Every structure is written in C-alpha cells, then in structure tokens.
Image (cartoon, helix red, strand yellow):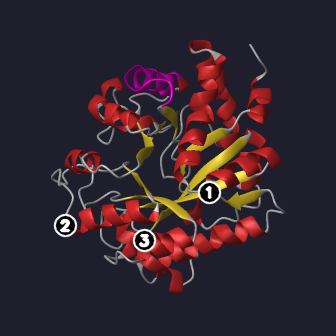
Amino acid sequence: MSDVNELHRRWCIADGHADSLMWNRDLCVRSSQGHVDFPRLREAGVKLQCFTLVTRGFPFIGGFPVFAAWKGWPREARSSEWRRALWQIERLSEFCGRSEGQVRITTTGSMLEENLAQGRLSAVLGVEGGHAIEGRVERLAKLHRLGVRFMGLTHLSNNELGGSSFPMMGNRGLTPLGHEVVAEMARVGLSVDVAHASDRTLEELFAAPSVRFFCSHTGVRSAGGGWRNLSDESLRRIADRGGVVGIILAPIYLGGDTLEDVARHIEHALKIMGEEGVGIGSDYDGMVALPQGFRDVTDLPRLTEVLLRRFPEPLVERILGGNFRRFFRETLGG
C-alpha cells in the first residue's frame, strides 16, 4: 500500500462542507478547538475546502443570535441574516489575505487549477440556507460577486423558499419565491446544495432543467442513519446531472460511529451513483461529533487507510477529492 501521507500530498484532497466561520476562530492560527483551520488543513493535505455561511441554523427562534453573541460576533454582524452572511465572507477574505498566499477564495475553475499547481488551498464559499438573502432575489448576484458559488435553499427549518428535511417540518415543496430564487441562481452561476432539502423540495429541484446541483454533506438512506439522508433515487438523479454527493462523517447520520461506517455509506453511494459521483462532505465544525478516534481534519488519513482496504487507489483518489475537483472545475465559472 502506498504511504497515505504521500498520497495526501499528491492528491487533490477536497471536502464539501465546513461550518468553521460561525465559530469566530482565527483560521490562520492552529487551534486545539474545533475541527478546521488553515494550518490543520495544510497538514492533512487538503487542497479544496468548502466553507459555508450559517445565518440561522437552529430550529428554534432566536437561537443563532444568542450563539453569535456568545462567540463574540460584532453587534452589527448579528443584526440580520444578511449581515451575518456578509460578515462571514469578510472574515474569510481577511483570513485569506493574512495567509501569506497559502489560501485563496476560489471563484473559477482556472483559479482552482492554478491553486493546485502552486500548492495553495482553494476556499469555496457557500450559503447554508437561502433565508440569508431575506427574500431579496437581487442579492444572489451580489453573493456571486463576493465569491459565493453555491447555496442550499433550506437548513434546519422551513423558510420562505421551501421545505427542510428536519423532522416534523411537513415535507413541503418549493414556494413561488423558491422557484424564482432557483431560476436566478441558475442565471448568475450559483449551484444548488440539496443538503437539508425535504423530499418534495428535492423533486422540484430535480425537475428544473437548468440547475446545477450537488449535496455538500449527507448520509445515504439505504445504508442507515438519520432522517436527513438521501434516497437511492435522489442519488441517481444527482449523478445523472453530473453532481457529487459528499458523504458526512457525523455518526448520527451514519448509524454507527466508526470509520467503517463512513466507508459503508460511501460503498452504497458508489453502487448507485458510479465512481464519479461520490466525495467527502465532513460537516466539520457543524455541532456534530466525528467517528471514534477522529479528532479533527488531521485524522483524515485514517479514513484514507480504511478506504484503501476496500477500493483501488485511483477510486479512493476520486472519492477523497477528484470528483469534487471535477465538479467545481465545471461549475465555478470561467
């Protein structure tokens, strides 16, 4: 077997989902808290990390502003969901500016490839929940100008755009505003992240012909685990449109708390989607536990070892980043 750390140095290791910005840590500084910062990503060999902007998050009213105050967000940044999104974009931009050229917010496919050639981490921005635009469709174009390249319509509760997969939310579909937002996202060049979408909302998204979609973090329903996992039919529909599904590392959605459970979900997704449709979407810093013996991103080589015992090396390279590299090269824009 090849040396795993050497493989991580050579490969485009990619991850589809980290909520690190909401914790208000300095990502330029190595920390013992949380799962992700720039030094630890570099140590793990990660070349592409998606960072999501969380602006509501909790299914009870007032939860996120309390959390943001606890974590020391400025008062102005806490004042509205839109302001929360803008502040997190500003923070990531500041961190990248202080990274001495090691990290860059990445907005085009050519920039991604340039970063890989120069050993630079590509930070890809997404929004977790379309409530961040506060019903103003024109704000999608501004998000795109600021470097955002994907957005999920819902998070842990229904909103004015559509239905959430969270329990007891009624399996609602897209609203008229949701349809308008989806059309505008396609126009400006934002991919739709289908994580946290209800089954009805998923069906309506899949019926939209011009939308590019993927899933940044999820388990697969047929392999067990939690309420928010994707069905085999949804996996097929995503694969048919060239999308990628990032398999989550959170035990609550895996039906087990070992790296073998992660591999089990990956194996099932591969059977349904084929070799080009499956990636890793950790949900780092997302208020979820990681598998046993997995403290933070620097333990990612342990998962690589587990996968190499099951799959050939070229397939493991695709799972650990090659598929997300292909997807974002195609969807970030020119």
Residue topped by disc 2: 176
Judging by the rendered image, the residue that carries numbered circle 3 is 140
Q: Which one is nearer the viewer's eye here, 156 or 178?
A: 178
Image position of 182 (left or right of 98): left
Q: Which quarter of the picture shows residue 177?
A: bottom left
> Element at badge 3?
helix
| Mark 3, other Cα within 10 Å: few <14 / some 14–19 / many ≥20 | many
Query: Regarding mark 1 in the picture, which secondary structure is present there?
Result: loop
Q: Amino acid at mark 3?
A: Leu
Residue position marked by numbered label 1 in the rendering: 108
**Boundaries of the magenta span:** 260-276
In this rendering, position of residue 222 left or right of residue 284: left
Picture coordinates of residue 152, whole percent (x, y)? 39, 57
Of the numbered discs 3 and 2, the one sitting upstream in the chain is 3
Q: Which mark is residue 324?
A: none
Residue 13 in the image, given as x and y percentages of width and height:
66, 38
Magenta segment includes 248: no
Give 249 or 108, whichever is nearer the viewer: 108
Between marks 1 and 3 in the image, the one whose residue lies nearer the viewer: 1
Disc 1 packing (10 Å; few <14; some 14–19; many ≥20): some
